[in-house]
Image: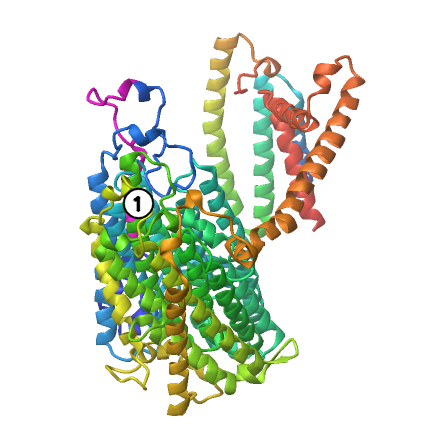
Amino acid sequence: MLLQEAVTAGAHPLSGTAASYLWLLPLLPLLGFVLNGLLSLIPAYHAGPADPQASHDDHAGAPEPMHTLDETGGGGHGDDHHEIKRHRYAGLVSIIGPGVLIAAFGLALAIFAAMRGVGEMHTPFVQRYFTWMPVGDLYIDAAFQLDQLSMIMVLIITGVGALIHLFSVGYMQDDPGYPRYFAYLNLFVFFMLVLVLGSSYPILFIGWEGVGLCSYLLIGYWFSEKANADAGKKAFIVNRIGDFGFLIAMFLLFSNIGRLDFVGVNAAASQLQFGGVVVTAICLFFFLGCAGKSAQIPLYVWLPDAMAGPTPVSALIHAATMVTAGVYLIARSNVLFSMAPAAGLTVVLVGALTAVFAASIGLKQWDIKKVLAYSTVSQLGYMFVGVGSGAYVAGMFHLMTHAFFKALLFLGSGSVIYAMHAAYHATHKHDDAQDMRNMGGLKAYMPTTWMLMWAATLAIAGVPPFSGFFSKDEILGSLYLRAGHSTLADAHWLGIPGSAIMYFAYVLGLAAAFMTAVYMTRMMIYTFHGPNRTGEVERGHLREAPWIMTGPLVVLGVLSVFGGWFNLPALIPVGKVGVLEHWLEPVVGAGALRVTGGAPVEASHGTEVVLIIVAVVIALAGIALAFARLKPATLVPAAQAPAEHGFEKVLADKYYVDELYDAGIVEPVVGVSRGLLWRGVDNGVIDRLTRLLFQSKDDDAAVGAVPMGGWASRAVGYLGSQLQSGRVGTYAWVLVVGVLFVLGAFSFK
Amino acid sequence: MLAESLFFSAVLFMIGVVGVLTRRNAIIVFMCVELMLNAVNLTFVAFAQVYGVAGQVFVFFVMTVAAAEAAVGLAIIIALFRHKQTVDLSNINILKG
């Protein structure tokens, strides 16, 4: 960081404090990536004389990844009878991997303390390192920006990330690719920190793409199973559609404002016309990017498939951090979004529809991780309802509490899967360790996990005083209020009045809340309550996960229960009111005020009480309904389960959206490629032409089969090789001709 | 005066170029290169009459470099002859990789 300039930093109150070590924050996980990556290059284990499999494995080269966990298919069980192939540097990796995250979290806390120390901070702390792209009018600095919004994100990423890294130590330790896993995970944290610390859209985009790459790598972590590798590809390709939107938005921003850094864009945004085509298009294209990254309709399809990755990855990337990047992006661009009411309404509508749609699919899933995946999609929808309606603080608040309780739910399900898998492994049974029909009654075997999972379930269902209640209530409440009075409500969306759309979204939100309560309770009942369906022998092997896995669960449990205290509503003053709102005020305050028409929206106490009561009643009704209707005693293991019928089957098959996309997009593309481009153009035209060309010469069949493409490239290569004759005279000729050509070009100008 | 000098140096230069391109004897090619260098020197001197002495300074540089180049070039040609028993450039194509 020698090139670091103190241009803005010089005058800023944060300069000279711990915040000047901002650059170290992403560098720590990057260091972990490099070290773990180097260790992962060393083969998993050495076949020494003590190894009974030595001669057997010698010729096989590098051992193939063992499918320790998350196995869904029937194949690849050959390893079951082998000794566990732990990586020989697993101990070192267990120190480096979580260590760099804990160090980063410590640094983040120090920076946070420094920020609190300087009091109110109205301008972001920007640290410039060097000019990355000086092209014409475009100057992009490699710079980091620290403000209240990125601070919150950094704390969530490093804090929750550190807990998940610790959990991974227990969950992944016996995997032969252990160092590779931690290398990817550390790299992910690096890119995520670049994403939230970047001071301009292009830097944010680096992080945005980087986390996408790590997501791809980790979804396909057990790539030797085709389904897992396909899931990774799907995530990557679907996200490209979103990234296209992001890029277009950046191009539009540059051509209309001429700046891409957040400070410049926010200052120059007022040049744009309020509600005009330009700003609306920019926001909509940004939202396309968000829909890809944060799994909203119509691009949500990759997230449920992403569950093919290891469970801690689902917790970190596909629940707590990466998928919330879209919410962060909108909160970060609040100045732009507050100027485009139509775009805001789109975000609200898409978010609400996604929330209800995904929640309904979650009602009928049997895979415990799939339930949580659809739940994540649904909760992300809530966050978009929040930030779309201009309630940026509410959206960020839900992002935060969701990071706590959803990480807990995923890690809890991870510990359940770990126990289930260990039980099946011990008895060499090849059943699905993730299917809830094979679980049941786990309460008796894993009491800690059971208790913590209930805390998270109550939080996500929105039962007071758990954290999710406060954040969800704030989103729905502020949506309701803004539907009555805001620039969004006054605007029109495709001819429909904005307030109508927002009231509709509010109803959808309530419906989603009800379904959330139902499917979460269903998951808990089927997993932990009722009789056990794992199997007579297997039952004896079920036990609680080791402390390295339950420890992080306990911390997340505490946060899930008390996370609501970070932003208490004025109505329930059981502590300091509106901490987060006050904290984020310098970043999102201006945008939020513009949406509400210059003055903060205030609801009468009566309205607010009614809204809260409605939300709580709906949550409790959902839980009660699940308890009343679901009979875990009648459930049979997955292998003997009867087929579903009617609408239940539609839900279990996820509304056939994947099939629709397959038929509508994938099949035509593959069909055109195969039928027209391969069979038609390549085989039909090019090869036939080649045959014609060659048949006029002496050789017939053998040469005729040579494809034209290969012949052409060899011909070009032959010509190129003839240029190098080794004769000085030829070279001199070429030189003179070149000189004449250049001179000629100059004299004509 | 300037125009005539420039014309003369252009002619000299072209003789040099054609010699380099067409002759196959390495010694003659080498002499043609010297001819080209001196043609350039002539332009420098001619322009120095109009624009000041800086051009003449350049001529000294070129002459120094040309002397060094002649020494090295002739040494290479001698080494080449010892190796190949010929200085015919069409027989020398060992530059090919």
> Does the stretch in magenta take in A40?
yes
Q: Is residue A616 above or below residue A669?
A: below
Judge from the rendering whether residue A125 lies leftward or rightward of residue B57; answer left or right: left
| Rendered view: A697 above or below A272 | above
* Neighbourhood count class around disc 1 (C-alpha, 10 Å): few under 14, some 14–19, many 20 upward: many
Give amino acid for label 1: Met
List x then y, in percent, for residue A84. 26, 33
- The residue furthest right is A696
Q: How is the image coloured?
A: rainbow
Residue A331 against residue A172 in the figure, above or below = below
Asked which secondary structure carries label 1, the reply is helix
Question: Residue A371: image x %, image y %?
Answer: 42, 56
Q: Residue at x 44, y 55 (%)?
A: A206
**Residue A147 on the magenta span:** no
Read off the magenta span. Answer: A29-55
Q: Is residue A307 visible?
A: yes
Q: Position of residue A418 (x, y in %)?
A: 29, 46
Left or right: A270, with A111 as reference point: right
Q: Residue at x 61, y 23 (%)?
A: A721
Residues A739 and A124: in front is A124
Q: From the image, which quarter does the N terminus of chain B lie in? A: top right
- Residue at the top extreme, as displayed: B85
Q: Quadrant of residue A698?
A: top right
Which residue bears the numbered disc 1? Answer: A420
Q: Nearer the viewer, residue B28 or A625?
A: A625
Q: Is residue A150 visible?
A: no
Residue A730 sits in quarter: top right
